[in-house]
Image: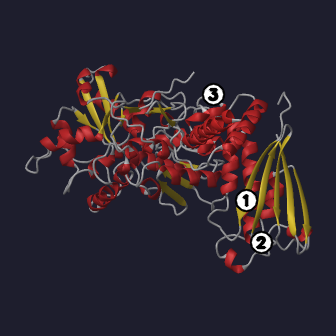
């Protein structure tokens, strides 16, 4: 039943079973079993927190390798705007675009172009009668999946527009087929250069019934190593950026929101902050706002786990880089005051509740009573030694048959003490 | 629900004078109800009513105790405090009526919508209050 393909994986040879990733996982999807972390794929939202926090580099993302582009006759690079923040002293995005052509791509289509269109469409969408506000962005795939798993009531608030990566992928393919009529669609490889593993999952799984237009997802860190070998200041750029400040700013938290030219926006970053904002929206506990931009990574996409540079340094670089850029180069024509239908999702995924105890409420209630009872007996120090992130989660694992009570080292110590007492007590009994 | 089950009780202490932690109990309840498989709309109604109640206890009563009882036919929320009590319940139920102090209003609370919202989102609501002794609010949300 669970067919979701994830992009976060573990290298068991490097994992020491240290519990760090388990403690940081926002959906409690990780357990330590036999000294090694195990990810529950139903609960995992591909946020990458475990990759970010693993002290042994045992968690990694599964992306396509750069060599895989060779499968395609015509290779298009789709750089996420965060890529441009990875280079020191970059004053012209053209150098990076030229670099992508020099390492083997046939064309480059900036995701910023798609982002500027999505910004323009979002401005239009916000004027639609009868939409549920606040409208919540679907650009961050982690947030979109989180809402589907955990905030079903907010599903109608999700903006039904394709994210910039998909809009860019579609336009890139169209452009290639127009300029090279000899190409068939399957000859073209659309390759997203990603700051995070969640985009890889999105490309593989789609969203609802929507199938991604992206063929390959390559990690930004792998492309970076290729690029710095060819990017030279003296190299003349034959290619210039086709996007402005709005597109570039999507890489940082607040960029997507500020492009709406509207005061009534809220932008949050970091997965735990995102969760608390969603909880507040669900409780009706926020001021009247039109749009909510949510980024799972700290500072936005520049904080993705596949980036090289510290997110705050990256943010500063983008501020410098965008200073003399035009506002936007990709607004739809004035006459075009509608959103093309192909930019909409036809449906959104169904509510798929995270860690429901049972399909039957009565049975769930019985299980939860048991969990509460077991939890009361546990020490409550949430040490993680048992392999569960908290005593509460451990109690649930015991009741659901996934853990043994004696995995709790404190409980086990008490048991040993009891045996020792009985043993020494036994001597005196013998003496009687 | 096809089989009778023992009612399930969740109990929380609501910390007085602490706006930062106000709302924590409703977030926890939401998590538990989701695990039980309660439908999203019911969860939302419970969590809104509970959040409003928590805030009231922080503003007026220096905290109290919140209990949520999940049974076969409904979810019952009981908010009990030892605060000043409500002198005129009818007046307190009017939208916009508030006795919240200025320092609380400056934080954006005290709009006089707490009790009316609790009533709006629940199927049954009963207020038992004795001036000088405290208030107990019992609300029911049916499935």
Whether residue A93 sits left or right of residue A282 in the image: it is left
Residue named by callout 2: B60
Instruction: Give the quadrant of residue B39.
Output: top right
- Give the residue furthest to the front: A432
Residue named by callout 1: B13
Dot 3: element: loop
Decide which of A185, B83 is in the foreground and name it.
Answer: B83
Decide which of A337, A212 is in the foreground and name it.
Answer: A212
Residue named by callout 3: A401
The image shows residue A173 at horizontal and vertical percentages of 33, 30
Whether residue A361 sits left or right of residue A191 in the image: it is right
Position of residue A339 relative to residue A190, above or below, is: below
The image shows residue A286 at horizontal and vertical percentages of 63, 60
Dot 1: element: strand
What is the crowding at mark 3: few (fewer than 14 residues within 10 Å), some, or many (at least 20)? few
The lab-note entry on whether marks 3 and 2 share a chain reads no
């Amino acid at each position: 039943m669970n067919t979701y393909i994830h992009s976060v994986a573990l290298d068991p040879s490097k994992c020491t079973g240290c519990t760090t990733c388990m403690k940081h996982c926002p959906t409690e999807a990780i357990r330590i079993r036999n000294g090694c972390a195990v990810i529950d794929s139903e609960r995992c939202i591909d946020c990458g927190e475990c990759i970010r926090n693993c002290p042994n580099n045992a968690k990694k993302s599964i992306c396509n390798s750069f060599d895989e582009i060779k499968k395609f006759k015509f290779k298009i690079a789709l750089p996420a705007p965060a890529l441009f923040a990875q280079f020191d002293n970059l004053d012209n995005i053209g150098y990076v675009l030229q670099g992508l052509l020099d390492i083997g791509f046939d064309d480059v289509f900036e995701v910023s172009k798609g982002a500027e269109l999505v910004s323009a469409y979002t401005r239009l969408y916000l004027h639609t009668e009868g939409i549920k506000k606040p409208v919540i962005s679907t650009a961050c795939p982690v947030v979109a999946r989180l809402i589907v798993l955990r905030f079903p009531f907010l599903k109608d608030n999700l903006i039904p527009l394709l994210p910039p990566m998909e809009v860019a992928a579609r336009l890139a393919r169209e452009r290639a087929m127009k300029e090279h009529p000899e190409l068939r669609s399957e000859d073209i490889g659309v390759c997203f250069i990603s700051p995070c593993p969640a985009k890889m999952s999105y490309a593989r799984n789609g969203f609802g019934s929507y199938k991604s237009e992206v063929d390959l997802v390559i990690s930004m860190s792998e492309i970076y190593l290729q690029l710095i070998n060819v990017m030279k200041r003296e190299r003349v750029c034959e290619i210039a950026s086709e996007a402005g400040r709005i597109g570039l700013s999507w890489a940082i938290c607040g960029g997507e929101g500020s492009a709406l030219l509207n005061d009534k926006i809220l932008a949050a970053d970091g997965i735990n902050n995102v969760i608390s904002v969603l909880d507040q929206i669900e409780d009706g506990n926020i001021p009247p706002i039109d749009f909510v931009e949510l980024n799972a990574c700290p500072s936005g996409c520049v904080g993705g786990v596949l980036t090289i540079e510290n997110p705050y340094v990256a943010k500063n670089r983008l501020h410098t880089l965008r200073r003399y850029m035009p506002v936007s180069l990709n607004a739809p024509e004035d006459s075009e005051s509608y959103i093309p239908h192909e930019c909409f999702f036809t449906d959104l995924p169904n509510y798929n509740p995270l860690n429901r105890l049972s399909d039957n409420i009565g049975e769930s209630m019985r299980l939860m009573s048991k969990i509460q009872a077991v939890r009361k007996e546990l020490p409550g120090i949430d040490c993680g030694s048992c392999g569960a992130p908290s005593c509460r989660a451990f109690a649930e694992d015991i009741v659901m048959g996934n853990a043994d009570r004696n995995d709790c080292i404190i409980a086990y110590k008490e048991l040993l003490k009891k045996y020792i007492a009985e043993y020494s007590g036994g001597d005196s009994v013998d003496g009687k | 629900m096809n089989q009778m089950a023992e009612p399930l009780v969740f109990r929380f202490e609501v910390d007085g004078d602490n706006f930062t932690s106000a709302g924590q109990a409703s977030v926890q309840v939401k998590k538990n109800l989701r695990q039980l498989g309660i439908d999203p709309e019911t969860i939302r109604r419970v969590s809104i009513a509970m959040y409003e109640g928590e805030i009231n206890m922080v503003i007026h009563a220096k905290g109290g105790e919140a209990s949520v009882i999940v049974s076969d036919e409904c979810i019952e929320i009981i908010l009990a405090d030892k605060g000043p009590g409500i002198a005129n319940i009818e007046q307190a139920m009017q939208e916009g009526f508030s006795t919240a102090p200025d320092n609380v209003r400056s934080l954006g609370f005290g709009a006089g919508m707490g009790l009316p919202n609790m009533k709006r989102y629940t199927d049954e609501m009963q207020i038992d209050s004795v001036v000088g002794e405290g208030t107990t609010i019992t609300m029911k949300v049916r499935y």
